[in-house]
Amino acid sequence: MVLLLAVGILGGGLYYLKGRVGGGEENLTPPSVQTGMATGVTGTSAVLIATLDLGGYGSAEVSFKWREAGGNWNYVEPWLRVYSGGSRRYTLTGLTPGKTYEFQALLRFDGKVVEGNVRSFTTPLPTTGFSMTGTIRGVYFPRMSFSASLTPEGKVRLYVVSGETTLAPENWEWRAENEDGPVTPFLPGQEALSPGGSVLLDLRSQVQAGSVGRGDRIRIRHLPSGFSYPGVTIS
């Protein structure tokens, strides 16, 4: 048996002729294709890779099919004619972030199509644009309970009934409130308070105006920590 193989150029294209002598035929090794891992995956695109072996053939056509996992297949057109083995790449665009896609490399020759293995990739979701790390530190505020009373002079004395001794100077804010809402601005103070001690709040103008009196409350806030204590009713 003798194999006749003619190679020529016709109309700008390369062609191959196979023949047989003595009643026998020489079969060429068929091409094969493998699907490579997708690379360069972003939220909207990915690069598909096919690895080809043309076997005994001088040319073949390569393409891909792809889909969102579980969906219908889409085919890349047109097919690319190749004249040697190796890797071929195709950039797939228009994808949706956070989705999983499947794809397969395809190789066509002599009217036949062979398929590579199915691979998949997942497009990443968009990030927030920044990352943040930090250490959360405990915020100290003194444990205290208070009482308040109205003096004959129209001032309000705030007593520390129980709790911890604070370090001087401490920053405090005091506010008188009634059922209609705040009636005085915050009054700053830097007194160091301790159980059994007290601080005198000069609210005479509010008392004389009738906006603060017995039954109203004093709101207390510890400035270094920002912690607010429950309102203390003026007796």
Image (spheres, rainbow, N blue to C red):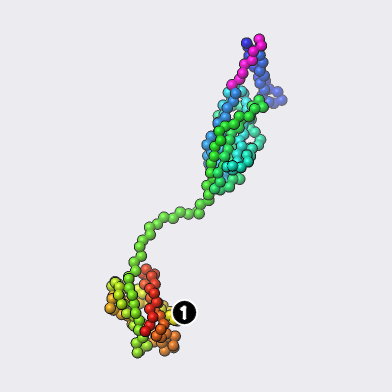
Whether residue 23 sits left or right of residue 205 in the image: it is: right
- The answer to which quarter of the image holds residue 28 is top right
Question: Residue 191 appears at what percent x and percent y?
Answer: 32, 76
Q: Is residue 226 above or below residue 211?
A: above
- The answer to which quarter of the image holds residue 119 is top right
The N terminus lies in quadrant: top right
Residue at 31%, 77% (x, y): give it.
Answer: 160
Crowdedness of circle 1 by 10 Å Cα count: few (<14), some, many (20+)?
few
Residue at 35%, 73% (x, y): give it.
Answer: 171
* 2 vs 14, nearest the viewer: 2
Question: Residue 15 appears at what percent x and percent y?
Answer: 67, 22
What is the span of residues highlighted in magenta in the rendered image?
A: 22-29
Q: Is residue 107 above or below residue 100?
A: above
Question: Residue 78 appears at what percent x and percent y?
Answer: 66, 35
- For the stretch drawn in magenta, the main secondary structure is loop
Q: Is residue 55 above or below residue 182?
A: above
Residue tagged 1: 181
Whether residue 127 sits left or right of residue 165 in the image: it is: right
Q: Quick check: is 23 in the magenta stretch?
A: yes
* 128 vs 179, nearest the viewer: 179
Residue at 58%, 47% (x, y): give it.
Answer: 96
Please name the amino acid that badge 1 sits on: Gly
- The answer to which quarter of the image holds residue 182 is bottom left
Question: Residue 18 appears at what percent x and percent y?
Answer: 66, 18
* 203 vs 149, nearest the viewer: 149
* 131 vs 14, nearest the viewer: 131
